[in-house]
Image (cartoon, rainbow, N blue to C red):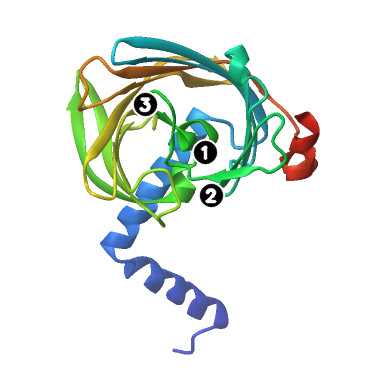
Amino acid sequence: MKTTPLLQICCLILSLCVFIPAGAKETLDAARIVENADQIRFPAKGFQVDARVISITDGARSVHQYRILSQNKDNTIVMTTAPASERGQTMLVKGQDLWVFMPNVSQAVRLPLSQRLTGQVANGDLARANFSGDYDPKLLRTETIEGGEYHVLELTAVNRRVTYHRVMYWVGKGSHRPFKAEFYALSGNLLKTAHYRDYVTMAGVERPSKLYMQDPLKSGSHSLMEYSNMQLRDLPDRFFTHNYLRRLQ
C-alpha cells in the first residue's frame, strides 16, 4: 500500500514518542516541577518586594531590611534600607554575576553569590532565586511528611558560580509548592536547611512569605527571611546597569 506524506509524518511522530528514554521523561518532569516551584516563590515577570532578615548568631540578634527589584529572574537589584549604618548599599545581579555598590566608593566590588550576607543568608539567597536556571534537577522519590506528599529532587549546580553546589529540594506533589531545602557545599557538607512557610497571596498568587534557615552546626543559630509588599512592576533595562546604580549612591 502506498503511504501518503501525511501518514509518513504521523508514523515519525509516533516513533519519537515511543522511543523517548525513561530517564529523559524523568528529567523533563523534574525540570517542570522546579520551574513551577520557582514561579510560586516569585513572579516570572518584573516585580518589587520588601524583605526583612532577622538573624540569631551566637546569641546575638540582628535585623536587616531590603527592597528587591527583579526583572525576568536574571536581573536583580537589592537595596539595603536598614540598618541606617548600611543604608545605600546596593547589589546588582545580572545572570550569575554580582556587584556591590557602596556609598562614597567609586568602584563596584564583585562578589560571589555564595558569600554570606547576614546570618544564614547568602548573597544569592536574596538576590537570585532561579533554581530552574542554576541547577540540573533529578527527581529521586516521593515522601510523605506530616500527612502531605512531596517530590524529593536533587539539584546539581550547572557551574561553580551559582550559590550552592547541590540542593536537596522537597516540593509538594500536585501543588508544586516549595516545602523544604537542604543546601550543600562543594565538599559535600550541609550548609543549612531552609523551610518555606506561611503561604499568603502576593501579586495574585499564594506564595511562601517566610523562609526559615537553620545552621546544622550551631544550635540556636538561624535566620528568618520575611517578604511583604510584593507588586508586579514593569522595570526598564536601564535600571540594571552600573551607570544607573552609581547615580543612586
Circle 3 sits in a helix, a strand or a loop, which is it?
loop
Residue 103 found in image quarter: top right
CA gap between label 3 and label 2 equals 20 Å
Identify which residue, 127 or 236, lies in the foreground: 127
Disc 3 residue type?
Answer: Gln
Identify which residue, 195 or 173, lies in the foreground: 195
Disc 2 residue type?
Answer: Gln
Read off the residue under disc 2.
96
Circle 1 sits in a helix, a strand or a loop, which is it?
loop
Compared across the picture, whether 244 is left or right of 127 comes to right
Vertical position of residue 78 compared to residue 56: above or below: below
Question: Sequence order check: which comes first, mark 3 or mark 2?
Answer: 2
Q: Whole-percent x and y of residue 210?
A: 43, 17
Q: Residue at horizontal 43%, vertical 39%?
A: 115
Tell which tag, 3 or 2, sits nearer the viewer: 3
Identify which residue, 124 or 157, lies in the foreground: 124
Residues at marks 3 and 2 touching, judged by CB atoms closer than 8 Å? no
Q: Does residue 191 appear anywhere in the picture? A: yes
Compared across the picture, whether 118 is left or right of 215 comes to right
Q: Does residue 203 appear anywhere in the picture? A: no
CA gap between label 1 and label 3 equals 15 Å
Read off the residue under disc 3.
120
Identify which residue, 61 or 43, lies in the foreground: 61
Disc 1 residue type?
Answer: Arg
Tell which tag, 1 or 3, sits nearer the viewer: 3
Q: Whole-percent x and y of residue 226?
A: 48, 15
The crowd level at tag 1 (other Cα within 10 Å; few <14, some 14-19, many 20+) is many
Read off the residue under disc 1.
128
Residues at marks 1 and 2 touching, judged by CB atoms closer than 8 Å? yes
Question: Sequence order check: which comes first, mark 1 or mark 3?
Answer: 3
Q: Whole-percent x and y of residue 134?
A: 45, 49
